[in-house]
Amino acid sequence: MTSLAHQDVKQLGGPVSVLTRQKRDHVRLDELLRQLGTSSPGTEQELVLARIARLVFPHAFAEESVLWPEIRKVLPDGDALTLQVEEEHQEVNELWTELETLPPDAGRRQQVLDRLVEVLREDVRDEEDELLPRLQDAVGVRRLQLL
């Protein structure tokens, strides 16, 4: 089982494979998280956060509505695997909600941002290192393309 991080497009099932799409989103998220780390509090940071939201929330919805049912169907421990990632998604939602209530100069804001970045990175690692490679091993390339 090879992490998605170490596979090229062909190994992932081609350009229309769900794994290729997932990895592409993860790469973009990493770029945005780096930008967030160097952005100034206020307008600049809010713009980066808006880009992160436009990527993260539809991405999570797609995982939960398309990938998780497939994983639960084809992997014997699929329920437990997807539950872990769903808990990460829930924590992201909670942190995001808290972040929206904090002014840019609030002392707690940086703690919430740091935890948000940490959870997003954990989520990507869990998906790329375990969850999605297990799906890849359980189904064929054609199924990955259909998903």
Image (tube, grey):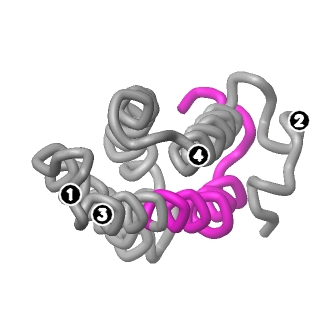
Task: Report the residue marked by disc 2.
Answer: 10
Q: Which residues are magenta?
A: 119-147
Helix, strand or loop for disc 4: helix
- Earlier residue among tags 3 and 4: 4
Question: For mark 4, does the 10 Å Cα neighbourhood hold few (<14), some (14 to 19), or many (20 or more) residues?
Answer: few
- Identified by mark 2, the residue type is Lys
Question: For mark 2, does the 10 Å Cα neighbourhood hold few (<14), some (14 to 19), or many (20 or more) residues?
Answer: few
- Identified by mark 3, the residue type is Val
**Spatial CA span between label 3 and label 2:** 38 Å
Task: Report the residue marked by disc 3.
Answer: 112
Task: Report the residue marked by disc 1.
Answer: 106
Viewer-proximal residue, 95 or 109? Answer: 109
Task: Report the residue marked by disc 4.
Answer: 38
Q: Mark 1 and mark 2 in contact (Cβ < 8 Å)?
A: no
Mark closer to the observer (2, 1): 1
Q: Mark 3 and mark 1 in contact (Cβ < 8 Å)?
A: no
Count of picture labels: 4
Q: Which mark is residue 9?
A: none
Helix, strand or loop for disc 2: helix
- Earlier residue among tags 2 and 4: 2
